Amino acid sequence: MYIPAHFAAGPDSVQQLLSRPAAANLITATANGILATLMPFVFDPTSGEHGALYGHLARNNPQWSEPAAGESLAIIQGADAYISPSWYASKAEHGRVVPTWNYSTAHVYGTLVIHDDPAWLASHVRRLSDHNEAGSERPWTVDDAPERYIAGQLRAIVGIELLITRIEAKHKLSQNRPDADIDGVVAGLRARGQMQSAADVENARAQAGCPHSEAPAGPAS
């Protein structure tokens, strides 16, 4: 992934992106071509040297049974948004502005490990459900469903562990714009109802600091 220095995500930002409830596109290169599946996951920073992503695939999905050639890849996406040049204070000053796109993403590479053990799967789905239900007023738990029903559901899935070998992460959140332009971006995103994207821009400015002189900015990804 192309990562200019001013868009490089720091360790704390990477941890936040991996730790929130989310799904990732799991991509594997196999002898039969490239396979990909959107997979909800839980990040465990204590597993291995760099942590691991835990998820599961349907048993009928061929991706888990096709041996991966080399590293596998999980692409994790944060909030993203179109950025209008009309939001920039710079537009009124000189007009040399163009649209762009803000986003946060992590490319997580690792070794794929398959888990086809009922006990592992039972622990995993409980952890995954608890992770995603944590913010609910009345969180659902695995125990809310009949035991025999859950057992049948577990037989229909296979566990996936991506033991992380390296991470490439990028936060393209207007860090290369003057401060007044960033204010305009935050206001524009809020007016559009894109509150998470607005918060991400503000957090990027607060965490990393932001250049207060204009740097080249455009549609480059």
Image (cartoon, rainbow, N blue to C red):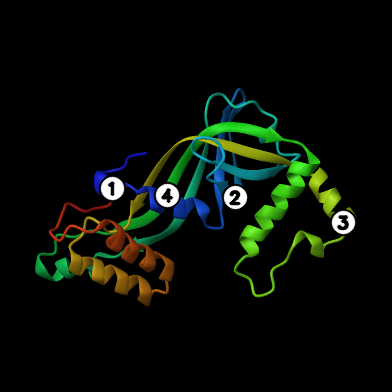
Kind of residue at disc 1: Ala
Q: Is residue 14 left or right of residue 27?
A: left
The mark that comes first in sequence, 1 or 2, is 2
The residue that label 4 is drawn on is 14
Q: Which residue is mark 3?
A: 147
The residue to which callout 1 is attached is: 220
Residues at marks 1 and 2, CA–CA distance in whole angstroms:
31 Å
Question: Can residue 89 be seen in the rendering of this structure?
Answer: yes
Badge 2 is on which residue? 42
Name which of mark 4 and mark 2 comes first in the sequence: 4
The CA span between labels 3 and 1 is 52 Å
- Kindly identify the residue that appears in the image at 43 percent across and 67 percent down: 196
Name the kind of residue labelled 4 in the image. Val
Q: Amino acid at mark 3?
A: Glu
| Quadrant of the image occupied by residue 107 | top left
Quarter residue 95 falls in: bottom left
Whether residues under marks 4 and 3 lie with C-beta atoms below 8 angstroms apart, the answer is no
The earlier-in-sequence mark between 2 and 3 is 2
Mark nearer the viewer, 1 or 2: 2
Which mark identifies residue 209? none
- Residue 157 appears anywhere in the view: no
> Mark 4 Cα within 10 Å, few/some/many (few <14, many 20+)?
some
User: In this rendering, which labeled residue sits more in front, label 4 or label 1?
Assistant: 4
